[in-house]
Amino acid sequence: MRCKKCQEKAVIGLPRHNAAFCKGCFNEYVHDQVARAIKAQRMFGQKDRILVAVSGGKDSLALWDILLKLGYQADALHVDLGIPGYSATSREKVERFADAVAASRQAKLIIHVVKQEEGAGIQELANLVNRPTCSTCGTIKRYQFNRAAVERSYDVMATGHNLDDEAARLLGNVLHWQVDYLEKQGPVLPASVEGFARKVKPLYRLAEREVAAYAVLNRIDYIVEECPMAKGSKMLLYKEVLNHLESESPGTKQAFYWGFLDRQTETRPTAGSMAEKDQASLHPCTVCGQPTTADVCTYCKMMARAQAASPR
Ligand code: AMP
Ligand code: FES
Ligand code: ZN
């Protein structure tokens, strides 16, 4: 197998593009896909300050690496969830990358420790509020991502969601006709109101296996294991189904998700009217001041319940 660009020995084949690349040309391809995503979706500019949410997995570490190499000012936020046997290793991978790569480019790492700030690890909090661990985790992460970005005046918050993540989420939303979620799904979530950070997903053009290959080829040391709480999740099932389709018919995932984005652009109401609709229903949480549609935001309600249920 020869590289499509330079005819050197290829290290990876990309059936969906009917191509194969050597290491150098593959890195160029990855950087180019991210640069295209940023430009096509008007995610941010060279002068913007970006906060990357970094979990210690391949996607978010690769994203941080790529943004720095493309010359962006990108700091990172890691949320240490306090999950035994998982969170300590995740944090270690993030800290090691920050010391080895990011520090030389003047990029900073912020760490939010759930056990310290919220008073208990994710599992304990989930038990206290009697909710599934993953949804408790999702609420805390979304809240802390937004808060860090807004309080520290970042222009945009970036996550490592890739093509497989987005296609799987789309499949789930379509299978259950979650129309509200479908309307909001996309690589850019605008900062519709004050107090909400703009959120972007610059890896949406790259498949999971491409991001994994990038991480391995560039010696990015990441946590390979999935979060133990994700076992048996619907998302993993949807990914498996899509991978099966992809192996029989390369390009299916891309056609599915990108096709959705094309149609969304055609039918989406103007950004102004969406922002106005959102703005009308949002106001500051009476406890913490972050935007919410209720009096008290989901996070503050959850923390109050946890506090009431915790042994004194
Ligand atoms: P996941 O939902 O685990 O697939 O994660 C999606 C994205 O959310 C990752 O690519 C990261 O950008 C971000 N993320 C997930 N977990 C964390 C964490 N503990 N700390 C910071 N960012 C995270
Ligand atoms: Fe949140 Fe697994 S990453 S529960
Ligand atoms: Zn609140």
Image (tube, rainbow, N blue to C red):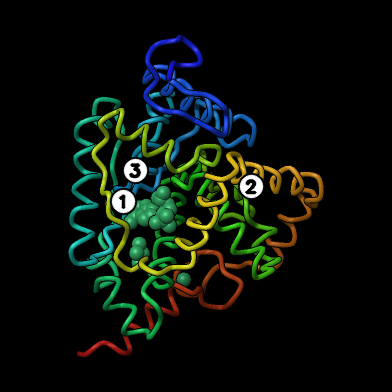
Give coordinates of residue 203: x percent, y percent: 49, 39
At label 1, which amino acid type do we have? His
User: Distance between the Cα atoms at labels 3 and 2?
Assistant: 21 Å
Give coordinates of residue 178: x percent, y percent: 66, 68
Question: Looking at the image, which residue is at 58% across and 37% down?
Answer: 43
- Between 257 and 31, the residue placed more toward the observer is 257
Upstream in sequence: badge 1 or badge 3: 3
Question: Dot 2: few (<14), some (14–19), or many (≥20) neighbours within 10 Å?
Answer: many
Q: Please determine whether, in this image, residue 312 is positioned above or below residue 76.
A: below
User: What residue does disc 3 label?
Assistant: 58
Give coordinates of residue 266: x percent, y percent: 81, 45
User: What residue does disc 1 label?
Assistant: 78
- Labels in figure, total: 3
User: What residue does disc 2 label?
Assistant: 257
**Relative horizontal placement of residue 75, taking residue 104 as reference (left or right):** right
Quarter of the image where one finds residue 171: bottom right
Quadrant including the N terminus = top left
Residue 148 in view = no
Q: Please determine whether, in this image, residue 113 is positioned above or below residue 133.
A: above
User: Distance between the Cα atoms at labels 1 and 3?
Assistant: 14 Å
Query: Which one is closest to the eye, mark 2 or mark 1?
Result: 2
Question: Looking at the image, which residue is at 38% across and 43% down?
Answer: 60
Q: Secondary structure at mark 2?
A: helix
Residue 276 in view = yes
**Relative horizontal placement of residue 88, taking residue 64 as reference (left or right):** left
At label 2, which amino acid type do we have? Tyr
Question: Looking at the image, which residue is at 58% across and 39% down?
Answer: 250
Question: Dot 1: few (<14), some (14–19), or many (≥20) neighbours within 10 Å?
Answer: many
At label 3, which amino acid type do we have? Lys
